[in-house]
Amino acid sequence: MSTFQEKYPLCVGKKFTKKMIEKLPRCIGVSWLLSLFILAILPQYINFIKIEFSFTSLFELTGIIFTLLITGFAIYYKIYITTYKYDSVGEFISIKKGVFAPQEIYVQYQKIQDIYVDQDILDRILGIYDVHIASATAASAVEAHIDGISKENADSLKKYFLNLITQESSSKEKVVEVSNTHIMKNINHLISNTEYPMHFSWIYKSVLEQLVYSIFIGIGVMGVFWWKNNYEMLNIKYYLIFTLASWVLFSVSQIIWKFNYSFEFTEEFIRFRSGVLSISERHLPYKSIQDVSKSQSLLDRIFGLVNVNIENAAQIVAGNQNVNSTLELVGLNHAQADRIIEQIKNKMSLSNSKQLGL
C-alpha cells in the first residue's frame, strides 16, 4: 500500500459489506432458477437423471447453490479489495483494480476535466463515498474513481486534487515539479514494435480466443436451423463444419493483423498502424494524450501478456461509423509495458503546456 493510500484509506469493512449486499438478490435469483432447472426441467431431457421434484428438495438445493455462490463472491471481493491500489506520484494519479482482468490507469492532473463525489443508496446507508477523477475519455470515467472511503477522506481527496490542479495547495500538497533531467532521461530511447515486439504467445492466445467465439457462433447457427425447423442441418457434423470454418477465418485474420501491426514513438507523436484488409495509420501527438492504462484479460494473465491503452478525446469517424480512438499496444510483458508507460508519462510532461485541468 502506498503512502498516499495509507493517508486516504478505503473503508474496507463497509466496502466489502456493500459489495456483498449488491450480490445478494442476484445470488438468490440465480440459485432458485438453477435449482428449478436441475430438479424440474433437466430430468425431462436427460433420462439417466432420476430426481423427484418437491418443494423441500427445491429449497434445499437452492440453499446449497446460494451458499456456494455467496462464498465465491466473498472470496473474490476480499481479494479485490486487497489488490485495490491507488497512488499520487508527480503529475499523475494511478488507480489499479481487478482480480481476473486487472486494469491500471494513469491520469495526468493537467488533463482532469471533472472531479466529483457521489453516493448511491447503499453508500448513504453505510456512510461511504466515491471520488471520481475524469479526463475527457470514456475510460477515465469508468476506471478513474476511488470508491468506498469515508466522508472526511472524500472531502480531503477532493480538496487535494483541486489544489493540485489549480496550484493553490500548501507546500506539502503542490504538484512536485518533474525536473528536466528526469523528463529527458531516456527520452530518446527508441520505442517501437521492433524494440518491443509482440510476444509470440499472443498468437496462441488469439487463436484460443477465436476458438471460443467460433464455438458460440456454431451454436448460434444451429439455433437458427432449429428455429426454422430445418432438422436435417441439426447434425454434429454441420456444427463442426461451421465452427471450424469460422475459427480458421478468424485465426487467419488475427495473424494478418499481427503482420500489419506496428508502432513507433517519435519526438512529437506516436505512429500507430494496424488493419486486416484495410490498413489505417494514426499519428497521436503526446500533448493530446488524456490518460494511459494497463489492462489484462483472463487469457492475457494465463499467457503472461499485458496491453497498454493510450487514450485521447478524439472521435474518429470512418465512413459513417465512429471508430474507437484508443491506441492499444498488445502482446507485451509487464517490464515492457511499464517502460512504455513511463516513456509516455515523460513525453506528456514535456509536451504539455502549463495550463492545468478543469
Image (cartoon, helix red, strand yellow):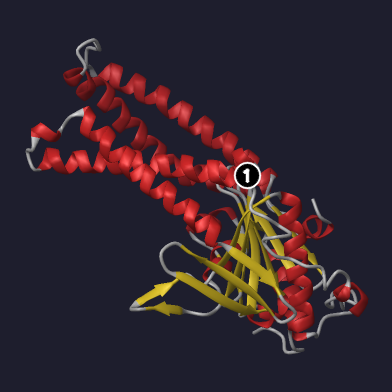
Q: Which residue: 11% across, 42% down?
A: 227
* Quadrant position of residue 196: bottom right
Q: Position of residue 166 (x, y in %)?
A: 75, 85
Q: Position of residue 308 (x, y in %)?
A: 64, 60
Q: Which residue: 44% across, 62% down?
A: 276
Residue found at the far right of this picture: 181
Is residue 55 something that shows in the picture? yes
Q: Give the position of the C terminus as an image quadrant.
A: bottom right
Disc 1 marks a residue whose amino acid type is Tyr
Task: Say few, some or many: other residues with alpha carbon within 10 Å of mark 1 (under 14 / 14 to 19 / 20 or more).
Answer: some
User: Residue 103 or 272: which is nearer the viewer?
Assistant: 272
User: Residue 24 or 216: which is nearer the viewer?
Assistant: 216
Q: Which residue: 36% across, 31% down?
A: 31
Q: Of helix, strand and loop, which one carries label 1?
A: helix
Marks counted in the figure total 1
Q: Position of residue 115 (x, y in %)?
A: 62, 75
User: Residue 261 or 236: which is nearer the viewer?
Assistant: 261
249 to the left or right of 257? left
Vertically, is 76 above or below 1?
above
Vertically, is 249 above or below 78?
below
* Quadrant position of residue 224: top left
171 to the left or right of 292? right
Residue where numbered disc 1 is placed: 80
260 to the left or right of 199? left
26 to the left or right of 294? left
Q: Which residue: 76% across, 76% down?
A: 347
Is residue 131 something that shows in the picture? no
Q: Position of residue 299 (x, y in %)?
A: 55, 42
Vertically, is 291 above or below 58?
below
Residue found at the far left of this picture: 229
